[in-house]
Amino acid sequence: MTSILTYTLKNLPSTSKWALRFSLRPLSCSSQLRAAPAAQTKSKKTLAKPNIRNIVVVEGVRIPFLQSGTSYKELMPHDLARAALLGLLHRTNVPKDVVDYIILGTVIQEVKTSNVAREAALGAGFSDKTPAHTVTMACISANQAMTTGVGLIASGQCDVVVAGGVELMSDIPIRHSRKMRKMLLDLNKAKTLGQRLSLISKFRLNFLSPELPAVAEFSTSETMGHSADRLAAAFAVSRLDQDEYALRSHSLAKKAQDEGLLSDVVPFKVPGKDTVTKDNGIRPSSLEQMAKLKPAFIKPYGTVTAANSSFLTDGASAMLIMAEEKALAMGYKPKAYLRPTYATPKVLERAGLTMTDIDAFEFHEAFSGQILANFKAMDSDWFAQNYMGRKTKVGSPPLEKFNNWGGSLSLGHPFGATGCRLVMAAANRLRKEGGQYGLVAACAAGGQGHAMIVEAYPK
């Protein structure tokens, strides 16, 4: 969502004029720190269509999401993904040979295991006859893995798919500079001592400058943090608004963790270390402490800080997706139906739903400013008419239904794995709160977004 709105903002003549349109209704989260009371089961129509195959979520798990540089720092991405796959196998007891396909999302690829889905699957004991591929679509990589799995089942190519994602920010690939790489490759091809000495004579110290991967768009060189800062300014989202929202996320996540609601988390015995059992980035603070932090991206006037941004995270997730008839034949009780598409207005229109029909919202929180700017855009007729081609606004999600068990700001955001966490949070919330429809949405670099309706499976 950050980059979708950023692409729109680039065509605006004046950010200050834009901000005036959205500064009339302040957003305050301080009164929304408690989760909504359990909802009563509602009798709404199902989204199932005649002669269309239903696709269900049987179960989904994730290893604990950890701040990068902590307990997972000595591992490789396929180690984390393998742990998530093993956790899914252990929880569901699904026979490995029943799985038709495995798809994992990732963003920062380890060059030694470029198809991390394949390496993780083999490591988890799946047959080498079970195909596996890796998809990268920035922060919606796991969302796309699930959508691809749904497509394979809907088309009849598969009955059972495992989808998920992984990210290890503790050990990102750092390359030599292009000049150094070229020289090393040329040296490898040189056949005589004279050729080697000639090449070495061209070496300069600046060749040793490394190339680090950046969380930025290649086409614009803009980081998501800069995008969030510009969004916050354009939509008149104050620093206090952002800090309040971040505090809400951490407070709700801590409450959910303490009450055992984060049931998708499976323990992971880290080789040579203790067993990790819970996310370690949840850190409720105070507005006073958060206000002391300096801007992280646009200095000194930006409003995006470390406290109201998601943090670099290591983690992995995995989900068992099946055709409904296959799941029932195997004796499973599915958790939810999946109804995916792209972007919130489209998924609602295709489903014939409105915002008031949604019982549980699970949106990816890259930054507080990104979430709150989207709230204002979604609640604006002017924005809908001028930039979305709609006659009326979509409407903003009510906070009492929104990310009630915490979000990416507090639970963490392993880029390639977050999508599955969002879907399982929605499915588990619907079961606990008695709701029927959940809406999952996430943004991604490059002006991309993904939305999905999660419909509770009948009890």
Image (cartoon, rainbow, N blue to C red):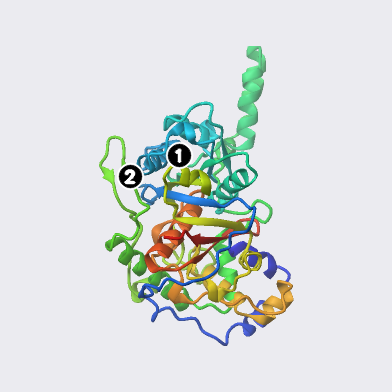
Q: Is residue 221 left or right of residue 334?
A: right
Q: Is residue 363 left or right of residue 65?
A: right
Instruction: Give me the residue at 33% from left, 55% from top.
Output: 280
Tell me the distance, in whole angstroms, between the alpha carbons under discs 2 and 1: 13 Å
Q: Is residue 51 left or right of residue 29?
A: right
Which numbered disc flags the more N-terminal residue, 2 or 1? 2
Instruction: Give me the residue at 73% from left, 76% from top.
Output: 386
Q: Is residue 262 left or right of residue 375?
A: left
Q: Residues within 10 Å of mark 1 (few under 14, many from 20)?
A: many
Quadrant into which the C terminus falls: bottom left
Q: Amino acid at mark 1?
A: Pro
The residue wearing badge 1 is: 77
Q: Quadrant of residue 373?
A: bottom right
Q: Amino acid at mark 2?
A: Ser
Q: Nearer the viewer, residue 296 or 246?
A: 246
Q: Residues within 10 Å of mark 2 (few under 14, many from 20)?
A: some
Residue 143's disc number: none
Q: Nearer the viewer, residue 124 or 72?
A: 124
Secondary structure of the residue carrying numbered label 1: helix
Residue 71's disc number: 2
Instruction: Give me the residue at 55% from left, 64% from top.
Output: 46
